[in-house]
Amino acid sequence: MRTGILLGAAVWLLSALGCAHYEPAAFNKPKGVNGREILLIPFRESRKRLWYTESQRGLALVADLKSWAYEEADDPLLVEGAAEKDVLETIRSDEKWILMDRVTGDDWKELVGNLGVQFVLVGDIRDLTLRDPGTIGLYQPKMVLEIEVFDVPRGKKAYSRKLEVTDPSGRDDPMADVSSFNKDSVIERRLIRQAAERIGQELYGYYEKGG
């Protein structure tokens, strides 16, 4: 209740000052996951047959999402430390989880229900391309991903969304003094950060800066 009152007051104050427009979370409007514990599972890449925790892109994306949440979200409560480590180790090494193709709400409830966690976020990086397939040498970064939020106490999927993230600035980034390999790495990392920001906005809401 107190968090909701403070958030409402902050939104009113910023609107009155003309500083920013608050866009509420798409999930669980208007509060999102602010003030609720959430466990972020490193995304999988199913097309590369990389399970949760196995994708370097998935690990980077969740790390960037955590950074965004701590810097931008109203009241982030992220599961970290020993509890997070134990869960990820189970997903990585337990035969039951390794052999899964799809994880249900009941599976998450069984695995993390004793932690008192409200939500679990999982995702799948379905596609990531850096170049325009129709033009040699032209960058057109794009990532397609799916996210799912599970309500742990209920053992149910609470939200799912397919997102497409693009980086228009990648089209005309000169970086002439950077090798092609390193340039690809720089542009991919920037795209991953932008994807993390987009997911954070879906879950927590965000302040849109005025012109």
Image (cartoon, grey):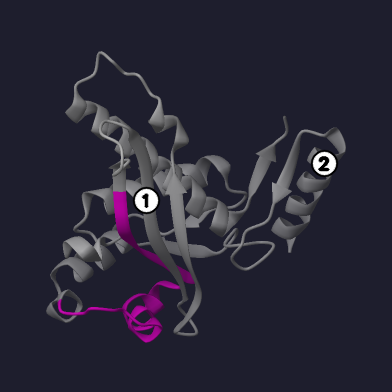
Whether 17 is drawn above or below 24: the answer is above
Of the pair 61 and 124, the residue shown nearer to us: 124
Q: Is residue 105 visible?
A: yes
Crowding near pointer 1: few (<14 within 10 Å), some, many (20+)?
many
Q: Which mark is residue 15?
A: 2
Q: Of discs 1 and 2, which sits in the foreground?
A: 1
Q: Residue at x 57, y 62 (%)?
A: 33
For badge 1, the amino acid type reads Met
* Secondary element type, mark 1: strand
> Which residue position holds label 1?
143
Of the pair 67 and 145, the residue shown nearer to us: 145
Pointer 1 or 2: first along the chain: 2
Q: Residue at x 44, y 84 (%)?
A: 155
Q: Is residue 105 magenta?
A: yes
- Quadrant of residue 173 in the image? top left
* Secondary element type, mark 2: helix
Q: Is residue 131 magenta?
A: no
Magenta span: 99-128
